[in-house]
Amino acid sequence: MRTTGSTAASEHLTRLVRLSRAMAWVTTIGIALIVVLAVLGFLIPDWTRNILLARLGQAGAKLPLTASHQLVAALVCAVPIGVMVWGLWRVRALFREFSEGRVFTESAARHLQVFGATVLAQAPLAPLTSLALSIGLTLGEPPGERMAAVTFSINDYFALIVGGVLFAIASAMREAARIADENASFV
């Protein structure tokens, strides 16, 4: 049995709507978990140490960890976490638009563009965060024990490429949506 073009398109849209509803929930839960775990990560010293190890490698194991150091680490990490949460909030809005059947709109493209920009921003934020953490946590140490460490990973490069691709695609989608709206106004 063959389906007509409009029936097939309707089935694809129905699947997209279902997927988008699920992804909106997954994104909402993810945002909540990121915020809660980030707060706990800087309130529980062992978790803070694990964050420092993840960001700075073995250099993070040797850093002092007092309550004031936990606060400094939390303040430094708040920037990339905030950017990530903002991006996830916007991709959540994108999924919500898709779940309502609004797919090729300027608004949906704008949400994707902001998400792409936040993914792209993670690339320089990761090494800058490691630098700020190492300086901020050793600033009070005596000379010779202060440290300025910058870490890079393949994930930083991946964020740069994926963020750039998402941003470029979303920019093209915004322009296409603008042209479609302009053409629709002539009819």
Image (cartoon, rainbow, N blue to C red):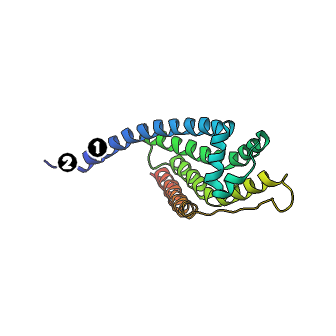
174 w.r.t. 73: above or below = below
Residue at x 51%, y 35% (from the top left corner): 29
181 left or right of 62 in image: left
Q: Which residue is mark 1?
A: 11
**Where residue 119 sits in the image (x, y, percent)?**
57, 55
For the residue labelled by badge 2, is the local secondary structure a helix, a strand or a loop?
Answer: loop
Residue at x 49%, y 48% (from the top left corner): 105
> Residue 58 falls in which quadrant of the image?
bottom right
> Residue 149 falls in which quadrant of the image?
bottom right
Cα separation, mark 1 vs mark 2, equals: 10 Å
Q: Amino acid at mark 2?
A: Thr
40 left or right of 15 in image: right
- The residue furthest left is 1
Q: Amino acid at mark 1?
A: Glu
For the residue labelled by badge 1, is the local secondary structure a helix, a strand or a loop?
Answer: helix
> Residue 72 falls in which quadrant of the image?
top right
**Where residue 123 sits in the image (x, y, percent)?**
61, 60
Mark positioned earlier in the residue sequence (1 or 2):
2
133 left or right of 30 in image: right
**Where residue 64 sits in the image (x, y, percent)?**
75, 48
**Where residue 77 sits in the image (x, y, percent)?**
69, 48
Residue at x 58%, y 63% (from the top left corner): 153
Q: Residues within 10 Å of mark 2 (few under 14, many from 20)?
A: few
Q: Which residue is mark 2?
A: 3
Residue at x 63%, y 52% (from the top left corner): 53
| Depth order, front residue of 21/28 | 28
2 w.r.t. 127: above or below = above
| Depth order, front residue of 98/84 | 84
Labels 1 & 2 near each other (Cβ < 8 A): yes
Q: Residues within 10 Å of mark 1 (few under 14, many from 20)?
A: few
